[in-house]
Amino acid sequence: MSKPRSQTVMAKGQEGASAAPILDIRNLKVRLPGGGDRRYAVDDISLTVHAREIVCIVGESGSGKSVTSSAVMGLLPKGILTLESGQILVGGRDITDAGLEELQALRGNRMAMIFQEPMTALNPLMRVGDQIAEVFEFHAKKMDRDAIAYRVLALLADVRLPSPETLRNAYPHQLSGGQRQRVMIAMALAMEPGLIIADEPTTALDVTSQAQVLRLLNELRGRHDNGVLFITHDFDVVAEIADRVVVMQSGRIVEQGTAAEVLNHPCHPYTQRLLAARPRGDFRAAALPPAKVPVLEVQNLALRFETKSVFKSKRRSVDALSGVSLKLERGETLGIVGESGSGKTTLGRCLARFAAPTSGKILLEGEPISAFQGGDARGYCKRVQMVFQDPFRSFNPRRTVGHTLAEGPMNFGADKRHVNARMLELLDLVSMDPSALNRFPHEFSGGQRQRLSIARALMMEPEILIADEAVSALDVSIQAQILDLFESIREHLGVSMILITHDLRVAARLCHRIAVMQRGKVVEIGTARDVFLRPSTDYTRELIASIPGEAAAGPASVMAIHSYGAEAQVLA
Amino acid sequence: MPSSSLPSPSLAAPPSRFRLAANAVLKDPVMLGSVLLLLLLVAITVSAPLLTQHDPGALTPRARLKPSSELYWLGTDSLGRDLLSRVLYGGRLSITLAALVSAISVAAGLLIGLAAGDVRRLDAPVMRLMDGIMAIPGLLLAVAMVALGGANIVTMVAAISVPEIPRIARLVRSVVLSVREEPYVEASIGSGTPALKVLWRHIMPSTINPLVVQATFVCAAAILTEAVLGFLGLGFPPEIPSLGSIIAEGRPFFQRAPWIVLYPGVFLALLILAVNMFGDALRDRLDPRLSRQSKG
């Protein structure tokens, strides 16, 4: 089944010399099951990837970019998506008619895949070193254990993981997201495959880990001679890493060319639109003068999670928040930015009273919210509303949108006619059709659902709107629309907003002021322009430097390289 | 991306449950077969007075241990009572009892499970109590309760229901614990919905699917437990025919008149088979993790 290693290497040497493409997709058509809005998931696409080249497929969700990568790996879901016609040549061999055994031999050996979610792609019960070793056990049966162990260490060092000797004995949950993704890359590189397919490999990562993974992929192709087919929805990532760009829309390639051509002179209107929709730090909101009493004030807020145990020595605690103080002025939008684990979501949940702080005060117009008890607690709900991250799960799938929207005001005894009128008014504000009221949540797209969940929050006529990563699950063009919507809501209704996001660009686009959080503390707070252009802490500088596509613009990009070492402490 | 082209079954709730149910029954042969068999068994027990003129308790000393004939379709037992009418009336009792037991244990289990899942302070004490009940073998508990309370319908139903309640409570509690973390539940709490309303409107509906499936298994278990109690002589008094007691009374005459054990045994087996198959088919339909496969 598997070829001796020397042969594989030789074959690859020849490929490199003859400059034939490593991956050559010709007129690929993948059929969707009947009844959909279009017949083909992938409609007649052709593209090539050469050795040492990074080709980015970019497009919004539903554009067929992931289906393309699954087709190459032979992983199309059986009976749902069928490869109708076309050729996929991997190293000159057409794999569209390859049998299962041949595909298994090819996977890992000649082509390998890196997935979006490194936590679920790794086996949680196996040490990462063993998982990498497993690749050799399948594909290079002749290698002895010492040789495999040696290769595993070399690979872990190759993907710049700190102290490979200790790290290979770690389980996936002991690693950070970025480290897990590097383990995935090490697995992918194990058999020196000619082609690496990376399906949104950095989407689930923080901006700093993302910058490191991108740099790593960029570096490795020089050393391992592999081509990379990189799938992403983010044009900034494309700008960072791509040699050539393929833009897909509804299963078709609308534009193809070198990165410089496509990014600087997009021909197709779709590409132009996507590029224009990118959130840019354009600082649309100038800071407001502080009023006497801020609408919301947080004083020294702390929240400590503690594990329960009878023995004191066994109790472990995490400070999700410690000593957080900030103010929100009336009509202001405050951005809270930080990486995952920085406590920004916990802060939002405390403000919406979904979590109870261990100590500290939250004042709503000078009144401590701990005073809102019993019936008053519901009064507080009415004044502070939350928009959730996941528009799919924040609606009860069993109830119509109308029921869900009306629920809040009806709880406070509003009369039905008034509620109906307000629903229609708000649907108009969020540009949705009135017929939405009688439909169920699953009938809407993600962006539509997010509009509806904003409408639901506004139904309560709140003074403060807390948006927790409200746009991070959305495509760029939808994201831009929702941000515009937030902006117009702020202007029309004068609501104060707290925008929790990991994306500095989103915050800079919408917020008057930005607070940067790290490990439960606010490390920097200031006007959007100041935080972005004149950051006062190293951490903020690092965050800004890690924004993909900004490297050319800012001189700070060198900063992030030092953070490789910083991750070692996660293991300790 | 494939995630957007494929429906995600756990989120897309069917708008019309009944139409889907009808569709499912007609399309799935196991479901259709078990439903038909179940309906048939229920129909013949309900119409027992029409199918047979014999009183199940009427003794006919001259016609003892007779094999099946035109007068006695399934033959007679050791006291000359018509076996057909005894089996039908016994089956009637079993089915009524099973329905009562599953209704009562589902209702009680649902209440206890909702309370334990939703009220943090109740969780530990209530669930430890349930664990305690589960630690006692169900049949033993039933025997003890019947021995204490006497063999009437109230104690019988209670004796068979009590061991089932903890199982259902645990099931409900686990669903509540996962659903209450859903953003839509939080969103509802966030818009000021009172806790009981949230529980009723947003949390309880998710427990219905697994509960319906569990109820069928409770049904089968109840039929069997009642038969076992009857067989052990702890069931209803001898003048009320039950499948278990018919089999027990026929046992000494098994060599001479095997039909006394055979027919009620077959009836019992068919009834439990139908209920269990229906439950299995229902679970395959309703369990979101399995429904993706059955759709393909």
Image (cartoon, grey):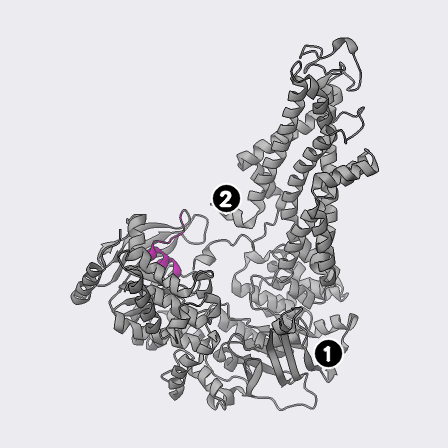
Answer above or below: position of A99 versus B156.
below
The answer to whether A57 appears left or right of B84 in the picture is: left
* Magenta residue span: A66-78
- Quadrant hosting residue B190: bottom right
Mark 1: secondary structure: helix
Res. A454 visible in picture: yes
What's the residue at 56%, 54% (across, down)?
B10
Q: Does the magenta stretch include residue A143?
A: no
Mark 2: secondary structure: helix
- Of all chains, the one bearing label 2 is B
User: What type is the residue that disc 2 sits on?
Assistant: Ser
Label disc, if present, on residue B294 of the rendered structure: 2
What's the residue at 24%, 62% (across, down)?
A22
What's the residue at 69%, 42% (across, down)?
B137
Answer above or below: position of A489 versus A328.
above
- Of all chains, the one bearing label 1 is A
Q: Position of residue A192 (x, y in %)?
A: 27, 65
Q: Which residue carries the number 1 mark?
A: A369
**Which of the pair B158/A365 is nearer the observer?**
B158
- Quadrant hosting residue B152: top right
The answer to whether B262 appears left or right of A286 in the picture is: right
Q: Is residue A72 magenta?
A: yes
Label 1 – label 2 distance at C-alpha: 51 Å
Answer above or below: position of B236 versus B80.
below
User: What type is the residue that disc 1 sits on?
Assistant: Ile
